[in-house]
Image (cartoon, coloured by chain):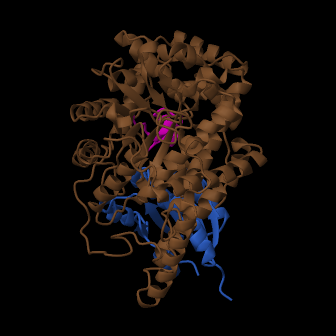
Chain colours: A blue, B brown
């Protein structure tokens, strides 16, 4: 039997909007994944520590405050530093499309904007996880 | 035979006729529901209001239970306050935006603070990195506040400040700026949001645990009742509860449950209900279901009036009145075909006006993408002006009253809200219900149900799951200059070098002593602010005494 995909849903920064994070967490769980949600106000260091401790396959970052260009790359850098660069990192929230390329160049595999069906995120994770 | 019996027969005949024609002309769907998912019947008639009392349910405008509005002439006297929430980058930039808005005809200011300010961190705090000036203006000390209101006479404008956990500090800064302008506190008009309970539930900018937070709020009620008599000391907010995914009835219920908790805390602290209740205000959302939203505002007024009169024994009619600000629903905006949002906002704003709002913020079309540009903000404001001057909706009081449908919806929202309030009372009140995660769970369940309805196509969102087009990435979005954080840190460094640090130290020590005892904290906070202690320094003193809130995480 396949091992269940483990996902850390995380809220980096000070942003308190977590409707999207909670909806996606529940949708991933309903799809059969094991989901851990960090809660609000996590530093990149806390997120990376949790990802490694929980041995997750995916880190899903949600942010609506506009601090994504600062915080997302910190998470991907720290993961690589800690030897966990094979964890798939994806992001979502109010993020202008103009920033997608920058974030991808920093190791965020995909960015999902407002209105993305949860199914798209689920499919992306299933097709792109690097850890088997 | 009575008129109603005749009508009953006629409606039965109508339904029989409908059943016959349904075979040939089926309806669009098997079940029709409101925006919140409540069932909607095909037809509403006087039979739906049978047994209801006009006097008890509605009364007249400006009269208990205020279902029809809190003033007797409503918008025939004057329009609602057109108040656009704004703020970004630093105090200089935001000051320019406020002056632009005032020139364009807004009638009140509404200050958006950045997240570090809302959570009581200075711009040079490690957790502030990347967040300074992003979702609002960065305020570190009285020096920033002086720039923010430069050239804006505080005895002439009313100012709403979206600030919660550190509300006492920002209010103190506002009072101190007014002092420098030569304006005494009794001349100030405005609102602080100061609603910590919904932060735990839906918005996330909490600092301290519930007990000291409730004390700070009660201290503000008491201080303002004596010193800043025209200030709205709290804006009890359903807005963010709705944005987090609640239904319309849940929005009313959870907001009023929070309101009950604040009144109870203040009464327990020894305040007379009529000394502070007239300055309580509310803040609701406006979503797309026009009739349900209008019913929601009407029901909320009725529920609150009865609670204040019957449960708390308030004697002053002003204590019974639910006055509220409305903002259109951010979560209803789509990133897809963003110009369509102008139409959504117009419908939502109309609902707020038909529901008798006291002030209104209309969202801009581009807010699912970024902070709004000046052009988008102008359209949003023009939307209000068109409703005010062209639509006719403001020419009579409570225009939808007497609609069988709207009155039925009003009754239903009231019943559903009362059922929730009963449940929350059983759990020991709003604070306990929040600590147990009950309120959060109810909201999350509604949010998830809504998302699944959209994904199954049961709920159509135009441009999102139907009528899609291929689109280019939008251009011309507002970007906050990333160097604003560095400049803000530089300003702080200069301030700390220049100010009288002995005075700051003494003021912070006095605040600490007061926090450990049970004195009102407003006077020592005001003194610390006048000494140019920073927001972070003041909040750190209170963190040291009060500790920090640690939420339980669930989804």
Depth check: give the residue in front, B252 or B546.
B252
Q: Horizontal placement of B307 versus B363: left or right? A: right
Does residue A103 show up magenta in the picture?
Answer: no
Depth check: give the residue in front, B212 or B79.
B79
Depth check: give the residue in front, B130 or B33.
B33
Q: Residue at the spot x=62%, y=45% of the render?
A: B200
Classified by dominant secondary structure, the portion drawn in magenta counts as loop
Relative vertical location of residue B319 with respect to residue B17 in this rendering, above or below: above
Q: Residue at the spot x=66%, y=55% of the render?
A: B553
Give x and y (percent) for residue A107.
43, 66
Q: Quadrant of the N terminus of chain B?
A: bottom right
Q: Is residue B175 visible?
A: yes
Depth check: give the residue in front, B437 or B265.
B265
> How many numbered marks have been drawn onto this rendered protein structure?
0
Give x and y (percent) for residue A89.
49, 67
Q: Is residue B534 visible?
A: no
Give x and y (percent) for residue B165.
57, 34
Q: Horizontal placement of A22 versus B284: left or right? A: right
Give x and y (percent) for residue B166.
54, 30
Q: Quadrant of the C terminus of chain B?
A: bottom right
Does residue B125 show up magenta in the picture?
Answer: yes
Look at the image and give the residue range highlighted in magenta: B111-130
Relative vertical location of residue B463 with respect to residue B497 in this rendering, above or below: below
């Amino acid at each position: 039997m396949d091992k269940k995909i483990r996902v850390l849903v995380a809220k980096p920064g000070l942003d308190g909007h977590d409707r999207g994070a909670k909806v996606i967490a529940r949708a991933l769980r309903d799809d059969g994944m094991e989901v851990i949600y960090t809660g609000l106000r996590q530093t990149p260091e806390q997120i990376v520590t949790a990802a490694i401790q929980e041995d997750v396959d995916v880190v899903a970052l949600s942010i609506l405050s506009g601090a994504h260009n600062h915080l997302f790359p910190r998470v991907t850098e720290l993961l690589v530093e800690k030897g966990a660069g094979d964890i798939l990192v994806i992001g979502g929230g109010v993020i202008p499309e103009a920033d997608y390329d920058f974030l991808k160049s920093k190791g965020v595999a995909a960015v999902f904007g407002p209105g993305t069906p949860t199914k798209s995120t689920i499919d992306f994770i299933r097709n792109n996880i690097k850890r088997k | 035979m009575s008129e109603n019996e005749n009508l009953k027969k006629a409606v039965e005949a109508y339904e029989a006729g409908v059943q016959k024609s349904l075979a040939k002309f089926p309806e669009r769907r098997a079940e029709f529901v409101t925006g919140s998912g409540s069932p909607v019947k095909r037809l509403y008639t006087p039979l739906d209001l049978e047994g209801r009392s006009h006097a008890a349910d509605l009364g007249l405008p400006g009269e208990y239970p205020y279902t029809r509005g809190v003033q007797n002439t409503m918008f025939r006297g004057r329009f609602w306050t057109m108040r656009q929430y704004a703020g970004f980058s630093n105090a200089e930039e935001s000051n320019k935006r406020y002056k632009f808005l005032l020139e364009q005809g807004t009638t009140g200011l509404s200050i958006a603070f950045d997240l570090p300010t809302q959570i009581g961190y200075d711009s040079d705090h490690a957790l502030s990195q990347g967040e300074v000036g992003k979702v609002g203006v960065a305020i570190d000390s009285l020096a920033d506040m002086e720039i923010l209101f430069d050239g804006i006479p505080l005895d002439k404008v009313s100012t709403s400040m979206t600030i919660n956990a550190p509300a006492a500090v920002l209010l103190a800064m506002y009072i101190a700026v007014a002092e420098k302008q030569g304006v005494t506190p009794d001349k100030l008009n405005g609102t602080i949001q100061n609603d910590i309970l919904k932060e735990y539930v839906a918005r996330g900018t909490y600092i301290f645990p519930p007990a000291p937070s409730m004390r700070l709020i009660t201290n503000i009620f008491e201080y303002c009742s004596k010193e800043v008599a025209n200030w709205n000391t709290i804006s009890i907010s359903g807005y963010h509860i709705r944005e987090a995914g609640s239904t319309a009835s849940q929005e009313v219920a959870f907001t009023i449950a929070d309101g009950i908790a604040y009144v109870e805390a203040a009464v327990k602290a020894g305040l007379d209900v009529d000394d502070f209740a007239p300055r309580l205000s509310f803040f609701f959302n406006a979503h797309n279901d026009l009739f349900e939203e209008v019913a929601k505002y009407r029901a909320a007024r009725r529920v609150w009036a009865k609670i204040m009169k019957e449960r708390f024994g308030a004697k002053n009619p002003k204590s019974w009145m639910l006055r509220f600000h409305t903002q259109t629903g951010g979560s209803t905006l789509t990133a897809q075909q963003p110009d369509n949002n102008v139409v959504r906002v117009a419908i939502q704003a109309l609902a707020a006006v038909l529901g008798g709002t006291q002030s209104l913020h209309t969202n801009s079309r581009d807010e699912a993408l970024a902070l709004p540009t000046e052009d988008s903000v102008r359209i949003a404001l023009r939307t209000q002006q068109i409703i005010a001057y062209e639509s006719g909706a403001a020419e009579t009081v409570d225009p939808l009253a007497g609609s069988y449908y709207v009155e039925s919806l009003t009754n239903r929202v009231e019943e559903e809200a009362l059922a929730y309030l009963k449940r929350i009372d059983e759990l020991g009140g709003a604070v306990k219900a929040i600590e147990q995660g009950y309120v959060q769970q109810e909201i999350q369940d509604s949010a998830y149900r809504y998302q699944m309805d959209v994904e199954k196509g049961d709920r159509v969102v135009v441009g999102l799951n139907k009528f899609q087009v291929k689109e280019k990435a939008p251009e011309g979005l507002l970007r906050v200059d990333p160097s604003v954080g560095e400049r803000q840190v530089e300003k702080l460094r200069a301030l700390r070098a220049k100010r009288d640090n002995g005075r700051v130290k003494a003021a912070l020590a006095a605040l600490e002593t007061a926090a450990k005892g049970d004195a009102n904290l407003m006077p020592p906070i005001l003194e610390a602010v006048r000494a140019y202690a920073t927001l972070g320094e003041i909040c750190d003193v209170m963190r040291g005494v009060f500790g920090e809130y640690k939420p339980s995480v669930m989804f």
